[in-house]
Amino acid sequence: MGETRALGIEAYDPVNKNFVSNYYYSTGSRFSGVLTVSGNTFTWEGKFVVGGKQYQFKCPLIFAADLMSGTERGEISADGKTWTPFLEAKWAKAKAAPKK
């Protein structure tokens, strides 16, 4: 599919104690939902529009205790009952480049 770019905007909602999330992708897809934080787990939940169709989306990102790595597994659902894997990622903090 090639390179995809995105613009993500997140704002803290002090009443609901979560973040309002809006992501816009160069493919025409978009995500609108909330990000909640509990310990080392960040979870996005909301609506994801892909290919002109709207899906429910959930994606927990679980960081290691040292915050140096993490895993993420996103799922989508057309009906809110049957969930399908959508993305899987492993994250690792890169070491800083040596100073010249």
Image (cartoon, rainbow, N blue to C red):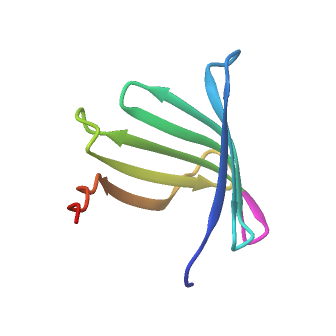
Q: In this view, does 16 lie to the left or right of 95?
A: right
Of residue 51 and residue 21, the one placed in the foreground of this image is 21
Which residue is pictured at 79% across the width and 69% down the height?
A: 52
Left or right: residue 98 compared with residue 80: left
User: Percent position (x, y) of residue 24?
Assistant: 71, 59
The residue at the point 71 percent across, 15 percent down is 15
Report the span colored magenta: 48-54
Residue at 55%, 84% in the rendered image: 2
Residue at the extreme bottom of the image, as rendered = 2
Q: Is residue 48 visible?
A: no
Residue 43 visible within the image: yes
How far from the left and from the top, in percent, is residue 16?
A: 67, 19
Where 100 sits versus 8, above or below?
Answer: below
- Magenta span includes 9: no
**Front-most of 41 and 75?**
41
Is residue 52 located in the magenta-colored stretch of the structure?
A: yes
Q: Magenta residues: mostly which secondary structure?
A: strand
Which image quadrant: the C terminus? bottom left
Q: Give the image location of residue 91, x and y in percent.
A: 33, 54
